[in-house]
Amino acid sequence: MFFSSPALHWPSYSFAPYPISREAALPRSFDVLILGAGAAGLLCAIEADKRGRRVAVLEHADRIGKKILISGGGRCNFTNIHCTPENFFSANPHFAKSALARFTPADFLALVKKHRIAYHEKTLGQLFCDNSASEITNMLEAECNAAKVQIFLNTKITEVHRTTEFILRSDSAEFRAPVLVVATGGLSIPKMGATSFGYDLALQFGHKIVPTRPGLVPLVFHRSDQHRYAELAGVSADVIASAGKHSFREKMLFTHRGLSGPAILQISSYWKEGQHIQLDLAPRRDVTAPLRASSRRDLAAVRNALQEFLPKRFATRWLEFHAPRTFTNPALAALEQQLHAWTVAPASTEGYEKAEVTSGGVDTRELSSKSMESRNVPGLFFIGEVVDVTGHLGGFNFQWAWASASAAGRSL
Ligand SMILES: Cc1cc2nc3c(=O)[nH]c(=O)nc-3n(C[C@H](O)[C@H](O)[C@H](O)COP(=O)(O)OP(=O)(O)OC[C@H]3O[C@@H](n4cnc5c(N)ncnc54)[C@H](O)[C@@H]3O)c2cc1C
């Protein structure tokens, strides 16, 4: 199940063997180097500074927190007040508990309030900025500036070595520190700068990687279902989506290629290729009860019953493929059953290009759950999405980024 050698499914970085080139620029020395100026990296820098550490954050993009800026439709769903360990999955489901307990949504909210950022609860405990996600990046940047954290943008690290300390080299500079925190995120949205760097680095230092998959991602229909339902693109319905023992009641949305919307994104994290999902199109309703009690039993009556809770076009199209042949009680019972368990076998997901997160990642069995430090390599830490901990939709992935960053930052 685990990769133990750099034979990967992603384009991997190569790390040159030590010693590094003699032409290296003058080394810059710090107490802590953090790779990645995303949610986890920035919060870790702030926490580490509170312990008096000299911190540098190295970021290959031209600005900090690019994913924060596009998150939550531009308003950043920065946490969820109902956060529990059950909102996360991992090969080791207990791993996240300690960090989540020690940095809670209230802790992050305290920071948001300190910076007077207006926010609101949208639904199901999800907290969003009233105005813009840039308020969160501005807040993190202000905290970093106050703490004199040095952030190096456009810094593409090409070599990483460890002697008595970590030595990182970019085209133009060399950075040294006894502590290296890897906060390079997952593989989702490559065009925003997502790379496999963190996974490659973990492998370089002997860590295992739980195979990665796109998570919180739209599902793609098989060709036959695409033909049947593509014209419903944009239509949504309240459903319960299930895969195995996992279920989510939220909105589902038809797309040109398949299904999306919160219910589908949530269940996509549990769906595996070759499996099917089930959709309850009529949660907690006995749709055919009035028909069974009525003397008028025909297709129009069934359609009317469905259109009471499903969008008209959806009800009509769905019935084209699921209409009962007769209207006897057993036939109506079978229809009722189908309505509560419409079985769809997706062909695939929309992949990392459209995924909100990457599930899998650095195997937690080789990390301390208290500090996120490697058990194999003292001074090496992994935080945020690069670690094999993935949250549900609804602010949980940021909460993991903050909590794991705080756990590492406090132990530096
Ligand atoms: C469209 C979208 C919307 C989302 N909305 C939400 C939401 O509303 N709520 C929520 O909880 N979660 C949301 N997420 C998920 C959330 O953004 C991530 O889980 C979170 O950003 C992970 O934080 P991180 O710091 O681990 O990684 P990231 O935020 O991805 O940060 C990693 C950083 O490392 C940098 N980096 C990568 N490789 C290198 C390298 N080789 N050298 C130097 N730097 C490198 C990257 O440029 C980036 O700045 C969303 C994700 C997407 C894609």
Image: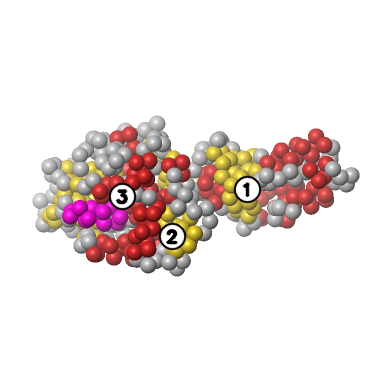
Disc number for residue 76: 2
- Quarter of the image for residue 85 reads top left
Q: Is residue 174 visible?
A: no
Q: Residues within 10 Å of mark 3 (few under 14, many from 20)?
A: many
Identity of the amino acid at label 3? Ala
Q: Earlier in the sequence, mark 3 or mark 2?
A: 2
Magenta-highlighted residues = 41-53
Nearest the viewer among 135 and 243 is: 135
The reply to whether the residue tagged 3 has its Cβ within 8 angstroms of ligand 1 is yes
- From the top left corner, tell me how far across and down residue 366 is, in percent: 29, 35
Q: Residue at x 79, y 43 (%)?
A: 289
Where is residue 394? Give x, y as percent.
Answer: 48, 52
Callout 1 crowding tier (Cα within 10 Å): few <14, some 14–19, many ≥20: many
Helix, strand or loop at disc 2?
Answer: loop
Residue 286 x, y percent position in the rendering: 74, 43
Q: Is residue 402 left or right of residue 246?
A: left
Label 2 beta carbon within 8 A of ligand 1: yes
Q: In the shown orientation, is residue 170 left or right of residue 403?
A: left
411 or 188, which lies in front?
411
Q: Which residue is mark 3?
A: 405
Question: Marks 1 and 3, Cα distance to the nearest angstrom?
Answer: 35 Å
- Report the amino acid beneath label 2: Cys
Q: In the drawing, does residue 350 fall left or right of residue 151? A: right
Q: Which residue is mark 1?
A: 239
Mark toward the start of the polypeptide (1 vs 3) = 1
Q: Amino acid at mark 1?
A: Val
